[in-house]
Image (spheres, rainbow, N blue to C red):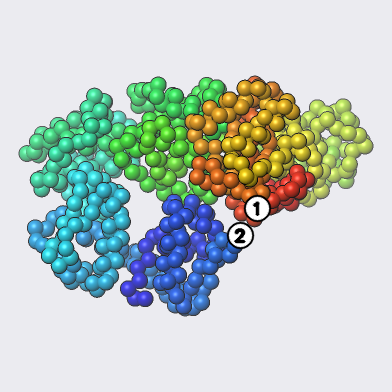
Amino acid sequence: MSEFIMDERTVRILELTSKKTYCTLDYLAETIGVSTRTIRNDIKQLNSDLEGIAVLENERGKGFRLTIENQPVFEELLQGVNEENTEQDSPTRRIAFIIDRLLNTEENNTLDEWAYEMNLSRSTLVNVLKRAAVVLETYHLSIQGKPNNGMFLKGNELDLRYFILDNVYDYLYSDNPLDNDIEEEIRIIANHHDFEATTQKRLLQSVIVMLDRLLKNHPIEQMNGKHEKLLDTNDYQIAKEIAAMIERKLPIHIPEQEILFITLPIAGRRTPTNNRTMAEIQITDDVNRLLEQIMEQVGFKKEIIAENESFFEDLKYHLTFMLNRITFDIRIKNPMLADVKEKYPVAYKMAEIAGQVIEKEYGLKVSEDELGYIAFYFGVFITQSEVKTKRLQRVAVICGTGRGTARLLAIQLQRVLNQNTEIDLFSVAEATKELMNQYDIVFSTVTPAYELETPLIMINEIFDEKRVSKQIEKVTYLQKFKLKDEGNHHSIIKMLTNEAKFFRLDSTKGYSENVLVMTEEMTKKGCFDEGFKQRLIERAEKGSMVFDRYIALPHTIQTVSEQIQLAVGVFPKQAQADGKEIKLVFLLGIPEQTENDAGLLVKIYDEIIKISADEQLVEQLAGSKSYEEFSKYLENNKRF
């Protein structure tokens, strides 16, 4: 056990399973950012290493549960891992030591010599090398040779520099070996072009690595053809300016390939915040088309871009620089990725769809860190949409127990409502039907003697603010999107569906065939137009309609109604779509003529994500034999 090394992913698995009673395989994979197969292998290895100390057991329908069999030893183990990750002899530092020896020593690099210098046992060092091999492989690098006769690092110089910058720079160049006057000049140039702090840091690091490798006679011999496209850009001119300044201060010639290398962090920089700098950056037709495709694939009409021009202009700039980063293999870390996934699941799901579009159009895989940054933009868009939906101008409060109590109610409501919302107080005698119908919402402690056209929310003198807030959200959606209130539940899917829009699908047929059957039936019922089917087929060709695990969300424009049309299909036995298991199908017809408020679509996304996160609910819904049974499962679920 003393030789047991826990990497960051293994520690993360233990942290997650310690905080929650059950963690599904998909949850662990999505949170950590690896495949479910990798998680399975990690858990298998963990259970072997922790035998007699702790075990991760998979309970059907619930997920993995951590059972600690020897608490003192388990706590000691975790404490040791935490100490190891903070002290000098951390796993990353060990890898950095090995890379340093491979790069900067002329002597034979043998396993025994390294073990002696690092004060490690041979078996521990072998584990370190295995971990190093995994990381190096992602940069197309490898450690070659024989452990006893000498080892060397094999790979492309550019890939090696990327690895250094992304993983071990702080260990290899901790003393910042750049002259102060050169650093100052680079910062002046960077500030002139409004490079933000992270771009300046990466640029300085790239210059330091470039100079170090060049002076040690390890230049970049040739750049890829894609990098040479930068030669005609303004970014290359900025790098040339930096290179010329360095040549004036040092006895060195910096060749074109090396100037291209320091162009990379400039081309892949984060989006500038200065409007003057933004104006100098040209948004290409390709980026404009890409954004249209992304929004259509998410489920919005492309016209929404023009209607929110300022917001989407910022997203276009972000996509421009992001495409540069993934084209030129520039990796960035997103320290808020885990929080984004957890707190903004709808925005992250939209970002994933955007990533699929980018991969299909450009053949470029978008990393989870990049998806997290795209999700920030969708998060802002969603928040703006929610503000529009929740905006209430005037509300009335009817109170049957006196003015003082009415004022108490008003104070509580002010905390729930927008601060600009006007709140008017009425006694039962003052609150006439005609007067109340002039308000956006009426709150009352007594049941009125008449029916109101305005939404009514019944409250007590002292109420649960969270519950009332959910009721306000519900009635505003009902009112804005002309939905019927059919009971005390908050399921948007239930509000949008009925028995005529529920389908038990034929598991003996494929996913696509079943969706076409649903489409044809909905067309016969007047919910979709005749062209919907062909548009749906064309949309499916542009990208996957698989929304999340076990769930598909085929969608396109419909011209029949000004309201969103939704049909639900359940597979008693799962089907396959795009290589994934499908149990539920939500067929969505988005109105062509509408106010283009994204709020309802966002709510549908949110609810589907909540359904997909509850494996038991997915099974219940998929097994429903009738719409009545299906809707009861939605009504009774506390997630909505």
Residue closest to the eye, 374 or 190? 374
Q: Is residue 126 left or right of residue 110?
A: right
Which tag, 2 or 1, sits closer to the chain's start? 2
SS class, disc 2? loop
Q: Quadrant of residue 501?
A: top right
Residue 284: percent from left, percent from top: 38, 23
> Tag count in the figure?
2
* Above or below 1: residue 604: above
Residue 620: percent from left, percent from top: 68, 52
Q: Disc 2 marks which residue?
A: 61
* Amino acid type for the residue under numbered disc 2: Gly
Residue 578: percent from left, percent from top: 50, 41
Residue closest to the eye, 194 or 212? 212
* Above or below 169: residue 598: above
Q: Is residue 245 left or right of residue 199?
A: left
Q: Disc 1 marks which residue?
A: 619
* Amino acid type for the residue under numbered disc 1: Glu
Res. 149 mark: none
Q: CA distance from mark 2 to mark 1?
A: 9 Å
